[in-house]
Image (spheres, rainbow, N blue to C red):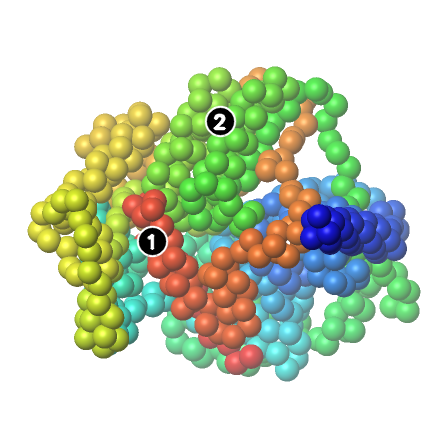
Amino acid sequence: MKFFKVVFASSLGYLLAIFISFIIVLLLGLSIARFAKPDNDIPENSILNLSLNYPLRDKSPDEGPLSYLQTLDPNANMPVGLNQILQSIEQAKSDDNIHGIVLDLTSFSAGYAKLTEIRTKLEDFKRSGKFVYAYADYYYFPTYYMASVADSVFVNPEGEISFTGMVGKVSFFAGALEKMGVEVQAIRAGKYKGAVESFTRKDLSPENRLQMEVYINSVFDEVLSSISKSRGIAIDKLKLDADQLELRSVSDFIDAGYIDQAVYRDQFYSTMKKRMGISTSEKVPLISESKYAKALKSTGSSQDRIAIIYASGDIVGGKGDGSQIAADDMAKTLKSVRENDKVKAVVLRIDSRGGSSLASEIIWREAKLLADEKPLIVSMSDVAASGGYYIATPARKIIAEPTTITGSIGVFGLIPNAQNLLNEKMGITFDYVETGKNSDIGRIDRPLTEEESAYIGSIIDKIYDTFLTRVADGRKMSKEKVNEIAQGRIWTGKMAKDIGLVDALGGLEDAIRIAAKEADLEEYKTLEYPKNQDAILKIVSKIQGNSNLSSELKKWSRYTGFESYINQLSEIERWGTKHSVQAIMPYTIEIENYSLR
């Protein structure tokens, strides 16, 4: 009896400690949020300062009373999503307290489709008569692409400009696996489905090289076209400058028309004040994008709603961690929106290279049920390929930026054969007791038999056929026609429009306008999904250890230079799951630019 009393007392004490800790954390968070919360009143003669010095996502990250605890810095400039950046620029256009926008572009990370959306919005902002200035200590190709939209482009006198073009890099691990004694057995549908090549080849196949060349040159041409229009430099001249490397110093770029002035940051602000017609000694409030986003006013008075569902990350089965498109979570969100009578139309914003084919099918089903009842418009972000395109197929219309990566309609499966590594090099052997000759299919300590390869191949072919059917039905095309443009090949949004995979070119706001038109709405409000997870639940989840190896390694790898290699570990982790047939883009394309930083 005494034993049970001790156990009960200990358990009760443990629960009380957890509860008290929870209350302390909650009160601490509320206190920090209270003191950290900025004043939402925007002073007169303010400048909206867009620094964007963080990886840009489609949707703003978690907010709430404990959001600052996640950075442990109550004064931190919290990341803002593309959705709020676009809203901020739109509101600043008519805000009498905002005189202009400064682009601080020394460092940021975003794909070209997102950059294009912001750039297009800034072009619209300039029509208000307000100025846009850009400043950086140095420019590399993506940051200069953004800066070129400005009325004037400034750079540090001792800075640099890297205008050398674009390059795509693919890492190959077949040689390393060979040295370790591991053979990756790949079965795929689609001759361009190059995801397997990182593990089966030491270089690009001719088909894979072709699609990369077509893709990267298409993006390059789109970017140069925009720069040419803004700066008045002929496209042929831009290409020549990138190839000849004759523009080296800041003065060279000024003479060639790329840069307007080379000034230090204090001189830049003085120039800006002159443009505003105020004294250089007067202080001008610089309003960060995160502070201005908090001051955004809601628009629309109608009870009708347009739901914006953000689908970002790899597509996985079950429930996710917030950084993925988890089948169960996304299906639940789609169903909830479908059953919400106030929602009259839906925009599905996709930023995904795909993932599990089964998870894609589960999401497709709910998207199809939704599309049967309400207008469903898909807006493609930087990438909506493979499984990312699969879940887009039920849409009434698909909108993409010219530089969006899409297509990659194909599937594959990988089974490693580590017999040499395990048996010969490590001395590890296995023995099996089986109920039949096929009970041990998929073993990693022996190669597949011809019969097993044929069996798995038939499964891959069936899934590929289903993929073709989904596209054919959604796009009102024959399966034969879809098969011609499928084969795992990637396309830019511009090329996808030409071949019928995309309906129109544009961004998220264009998709919302189309959704309103399809639903015959003149007045409406927008609702964003999924709802951000409560910060307390995230903290508890981390305490409980609800994370996986690859996600933690990815965070660490960003600061060590090994991110691309850790990404490959993530691929292996996924292919080791029971839902191992993948509909995923061939690779993560890393756009690299030379810089002396």
Which labelled disc corresponds to residue 268?
Answer: none
Vertical position of residue 232 compared to residue 359: above or below: below
Residue 237 in view of the camera: no
Closer to the camera in the image, 88 or 56: 56
| Numbered badge on residue 376 | 2
**Who's the residue at 81% across and 69% down the image?**
270
Identified at 26% across, 54% down, the residue is 414
Determine if residue 452 is in view. yes
Relative to 105, is 394 above or below? above
Q: Secondary structure at mark 1?
A: helix
Residue placed farthest to the front in the image?
A: 1
Report how many numbered discs are placed on residues in the image.
Answer: 2
Amino acid at circle 1 = Trp
Q: Which disc is residue 575 wearing? A: 1
**Residue 169 x %, y %:** 36, 66
Tell us which disc is closer to us: 2 or 1: 1
Up-down relation of residue 254 to residue 36 (above or below): below
